[in-house]
Image: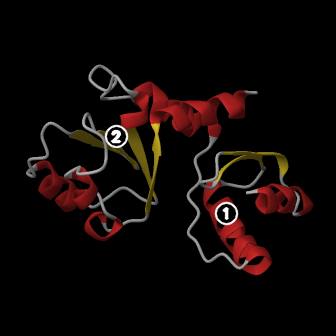
Amino acid sequence: MSALRELLPDLGYEDVRTHLQSGNIVLTSDVSAKRLESELEKHLAAELGLDIQVLVRTRNQLADVIKRNPLGKVADDPSRYMVSFLSAKPDPKVVRELAKIDVAPEQFVVSGREIFAWYPNGFQRAKLGKVLTEKKLGVAATARNWNTVTKLLEIADA
């Protein structure tokens, strides 16, 4: 993360901040989210040898994720409440198939390009972990717990 934090300002990105060691970056850019994803992927490959897909949310999109919070009334432990950020909306057929799967007491809601998932008993033996995979979803995904999601908005607003 320190190499990434040092690289991005040299490439013209401003206000670069990172959070934790899991690829959370907050920065200022004038380019669209899609273009930023592409640019960052190219830079990460060329400069750091990392071949990874980048998923970007704007500050306002992140605020909207927090505002939607469809499981906020039941998800009382933010470390067990996850948001999976998706590269695109999953196919409606996939969403319908997912809805048929019994994962109780776990719960999830597919909402646009995010999946909100509540793991009341933790992640170790979670049924959802086997269900909410990129292969089954048909789109790239990266998950963050609610603490991280809210902290990223706090950083963006600082």
Question: What number is the disc on residue 35?
Answer: 1
**In the image, farthest residue toward the front:** 124
Between the residue at mark 2 and the residue at mark 1, the CA separation in whole angstroms equals 26 Å
Q: Is residue 85 left or right of residue 100?
A: right
Where residue 78 sits: x, y (%)? 42, 29
Left or right side of 39 for 23: left
| 109 left or right of 57 in image | left
Residue drawn at x 70%, y 33% as measured from the top left:
155
Residue bearing the label numbered 2? 116
Q: Quadrant of the C terminus?
A: top right
Above or below, 59 relative to 142: above
Q: Is label 1 in a helix, a strand or a loop?
A: helix
Q: In which quarter of the image is residue 81?
A: top left
Q: Which quadrant of the view contains residue 5?
A: bottom right
Q: Is residue 141 above or below residue 143?
A: below
Q: Residue at 31% of width from left, 63% of height from top?
A: 133
Q: In this view, does 96 lie to the left or right of 24?
A: left
User: Please, what is the three-letter code of the amino acid marked with disc 2?
Assistant: Phe
Residues at badges 2 and 1 in contact (C-beta under 8 Å)? no
Instruction: Report the front residue among 123 and 75.
Output: 123
Work out whether residue 101 or residue 79 is closer to the camera in this orientation and state it. 79
Number of residues whose C-alpha sits closer than 10 Å to that of mark 2, classed few (under 14), some (14–19) or many (20 or more): many
Query: Which residue is painted at 74% across and 55% down in the image?
Result: 31
Horizontal and vertical percent position of residue 109: 26, 40
For the residue labelled by badge 2, is the local secondary structure a helix, a strand or a loop?
A: strand
